[in-house]
Amino acid sequence: MTFQSRLIKVFVVVLLALFIAGNVSAREKLRVGMECDYYPFNYKDTSGELMGYDVDVAKGLAEILDVEIVYICQAWDGMIPALLANKFDLIIASMSITKSRAKKIDFSTPYRVSAGQILGPKKMKVKLFDEQDNLIPENFKGLRVGLERATTYSSWFKAKLPGADIVLYDGTEPAYLDLVNGRVDIIMTNPMKAHLKFLSKPNGAGFEFKSPPINEVDYFGTGVGIGMRKGQDELKARLNAGLKKLITEGKLTEYALKIFPFAIHNEEWKDIE
Amino acid sequence: MEAIAGWWDDYFWASIVVFKVFIASLLFMVLFGLIGAMAKLSNNRIAQKLASAYTIVFRGTPEILVILLLYFGSAIALTSIAQVFNPDIKFLDVPPFWAGTFAISVIVGSYATETFRGAFLGVDPGHVEAARALGLSDFQSFIHVRIPEMWRIALPPFGNHMLSLVKDTALISIIGLNETLFVAKQATSFTGKPFVMYILVGCIYLAFSTVITLTVMGFEKFGNRHLKEAL
Amino acid sequence: MTESVALIFDSVLKMLVGLGMTLQLLIISSGLGLILAVILLLMRISGKWYLNLPAQIYIYIFRGTPILVQIFIIYYGLPQFEFIRDSIFWPILREGYGCAIVALFLNSGAYTSEILRGGVLAVDQGLLEAASALGMSKPQRFLYILTPIATRISLPAYSNEFISMLKSTSLASTITVADMTGIGRTIVAQTFAPYEIFLSLAIIYMILTFFIQRSFGWIENRLSRYTKKLGIS
């Protein structure tokens, strides 16, 4: 039996040593969680480098706050649980500031507008919204909707159209793929991304928006913000100050213009306390 | 085919990750399997019950759940364990590589426990007695007699366990490990060509499986060389 | 603490709704897999290279690649091709459910055929020779001697494969199927309580495994009752 207990002791010591070694560092390190697969806000290009609006915001903040940023890729539906389990310190992943999320985590001031829009094939004649942009629930019957788990889009759909035939995905890209190959009839997603990545490309030629941009504050919040665990007021203040600087120095506009022909934040946000 | 063009190096590094996970989980799997088998074979009732619980729990739970549980719950569990040793530690975090490696080692280790147990029972008791009669200590007879004879018997099913380890690595992509399936997902959203990307992942894993199978066959030949039939 | 208990209770009820889906995936793919396995087995033991080789290649590919990759190739990869979307298979492949069953049964068929082959090889040659001496033809020997004995021998390994299939059904959650794991992940995404939900889910799977093992054990005992009486193994 002594051999066994020796083995076990060696194993525990090795394990502990590995973890402690991993935690030694010099400059303040902030771990940032993002999807890494959400073009054009956070994604990897062919050289494996992380790029996108969210990544630029993170880099900008790192400079202003003088911290080292470590990026951690995380599947969307596990984003908040991972933050709470201390996998990373911040969520900079285009996460909308909603009431239900704010119950579990804190948010910074917003850094991007948040809205959803429904995409569908051009040849679909049924109108889902009338001229006054009101929802026509009956016309959704028989339509299969693709939505991502744990998003503002799925909450909106569940609340407004509880009887809909919903298919839930682990990420955005699979939903687009399935829209193209006809597995789902419509999807609800970010309009900026839809326009840039999809509608303007050959893949999206046969598709169009089937709804106006939907940005009800109850479901989409005031915008997209940085998520962090509760009780870190000092960190929140530093981040908000940093974001304010990014707005006033025109950096947010600069980041947005890299991808879109317009800014995607609200200038008034620099005045939020 | 041009779609893959920019991604060769990503797949290459991702394959290195698969290899690293394999080596790390192999070591842990053997460790867990040996500990479990010894516990089951010992005379200690508590050890036997614990080992039984270990095999029942991990042979009956889907791998993906164990991976997700270890990823989300590990920080909490390990922090409490670590605080027993060093109360100053505030939190211990487990990156996806280790959470995933640990998860698959624990699962395949539970199967390995049964394999090793059967193999230990297959060692001729006469050999062990002879070793003791020659004056070898328990530890020495374990190292020089029981283990060499045991691994030869365990080799075929052990080869299957190694294959399981390699294939389970694909599951760790779900918690963000940068291995080949994860790269394929990202490459798919960039290029819009899922078939090619996923087939490539299949080929990479097939290559790993083939190498492992051939290696195990080689070891089997080596381990059984003294049993070559006299013509 | 009471909030946790209420959450677990509520979630377990929701996840058990997925039990039907999980069992469907398990039984249908194992059933189809068994049929495929017998076909592959016959090809493997036929002795003809043009049957043996394709079967071997098929088994090699499906046992050498992770099942998650197989699922992704079928669900995400196949629709890339126009001819798939226009074919008669599209109604099946259109659904995550259909794709999951296809991937699972193709995989199960490969593993099961190897298990059955092991069982066939383990049948005592003497019995087959005796049957041959008694004038039984090859198909008769296969049906009346080989199959019953090989089945009994393969049963322990097959029960392991069946339980493996149960665990693999949880992977269907990655392609939108609402099985127990799929529902569990959705609940975790809404409540941010991974520990409680996944632990309860794991316990449900363990209970299922227990029942499956018991059932197979009972079947094994029934099939082996004549060996106990006669004292053979």
Image (cartoon, rainbow, N blue to C red):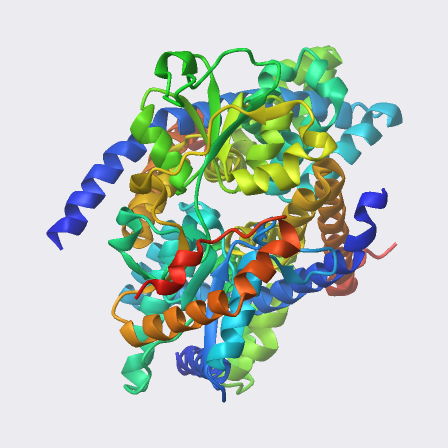
Q: Quadrant of residue C75?
A: top right
Image x and y of residue C119, in percent: 62, 33
Q: Is residue A91 above or below residue A127?
A: below
Residue drawn at point x = 44 percent, y = 49 percent = A113
Is residue A12 toward the left or the right of residue C210 in the image? right
Q: Is residue C112 visible?
A: no
Q: Quadrant of residue C135?
A: top right
The quarter of the picture where the N terminus of chain C appears is bottom left
Q: Quadrant of residue B143?
A: bottom right
Which residue is at the front of the view, B60 or C20?
C20
Which residue is at the front of the view, B147 or B82?
B82
Residue drawn at point x = 28 percent, y = 81 percent = B84
Image x and y of residue A190, in percent: 51, 40
Image x and y of residue B169, in percent: 59, 54
Q: How many circles with numbers are drawn on the protein?
A: 0
Image x and y of residue C107, in percent: 62, 33
Is residue B67 toward the left or the right of residue A137 in the image? right
Which residue is at the front of the view, C153 or B59?
B59
Specify the farthest residue to the left: C2
Q: Is residue B184 visible?
A: yes
